[in-house]
Amino acid sequence: PGDVGFGVPKTALEGGEAPNEPGQILVLLNVGAIFMGTALTIRALIGERAIFLREQAVGLSTTAYIFAKVFVFAGFALLQSGIVVAINIYGKGWGPGAVESGVVIPSRSLELYVDVAACCVGAAMVGLALSAIAKSSEQIMPLLVIAIMSQLVFQGGMIPVTDRIGLDQLSWFTPARWGFASTASTIDLLRLVPGPLTPQDSHWKHAAGAWWFNMAMQGAICVGYLSLVRWKIRLKAAS
């Protein structure tokens, strides 16, 4: 509901249909990015593990294999993110009172795309890690459900995680947390929806420092999960 997109919504007292419309849009954008990225890669390794082990035995580089997967799936993630963001901007628009430019990138739409794409790529790395951990194809669907539902909580858009002991710390290991934070920073969610509806999260500030920190955390998450993937594959081959 609502018709302001990423603009300033009317409060409930003013007759607004969706006082937190910008936040709701961000939740949907990031959940979509997480689902697309994770579903894209979660079967990538388990489905061809036997083939990989045979090829590795005759000299296939584990690092080259992983990076080939990353480049291909990252390309698909970037394409899917572009489609989702384009549909969102075309359907909802920026609305009155929206930011005139991004935090770092002058084009607000381009920066929003970068935010969502980074989240989708991060989720793809999570999917690869789950695929490396899974023992059989039957375990894939439960792992996918757990990954999606947990990040729906940890992103902080539906259920506040800011300064909540346990939840806040765990959320740092999920791309959803930093995907939502970077998109919130881009659209200046703290200004659009002030008050109790929006947690005062320092990572959501419309400031270059906050935005760069969010993106750096996405990068760190990608490196961390890729390191786990390489370790799991190498360990299996060695055993």
Image (cartoon, grey):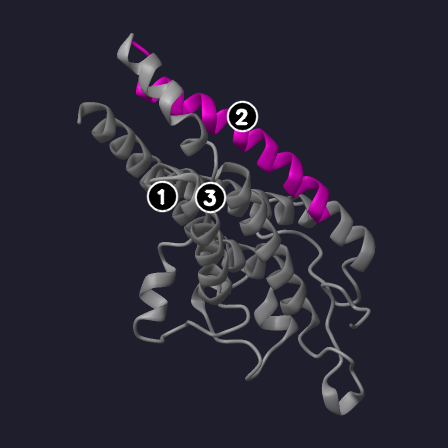
CA gap between label 3 and label 1 equals 9 Å
146 or 155: nearer the viewer: 146
116 or 153: nearer the viewer: 153
- Name the N-terminal-most of marks 2 and 3: 2
Q: Quadrant of the N terminus?
A: bottom right
Most frequent secondary structure within the magenta stretch: helix
140 above or below 95? above
Checking the image for residue 220, the label placed there is: 1
CA gap between label 2 and label 3 equals 14 Å
Coordinates of residue 5 in the picture (x, y in percent): 76, 64
Residue depicted at 77% across the width and 49% down the height: 87
Checking the image for residue 122, the label placed there is: 3
Coordinates of residue 22 in the picture (x, y in percent): 67, 67
Q: Mark 2 Cα within 10 Å, few/some/many (few <14, many 20+)?
A: few
Q: In the rendered structure, which segment of residues is drawn in magenta?
A: 59-85
Does residue 55 appear to the left or right of 81 in the view shown?
A: left
Q: Is residue 104 among what the camera can see? A: no
18 above or below 122? below
Instruction: Give amino acid for label 1.
Output: Ala
Quadrant in the rendering for residue 39:
top right
Does residue 235 appear to the left or right of 10 in the view shown?
A: left
Which is closer to the viewer, label 3 or label 1? 3
Residue designated by label 2: 72
Quadrant in the rendering for residue 36:
top right
**Which element type, helix, strand or loop, lies under badge 1?**
helix
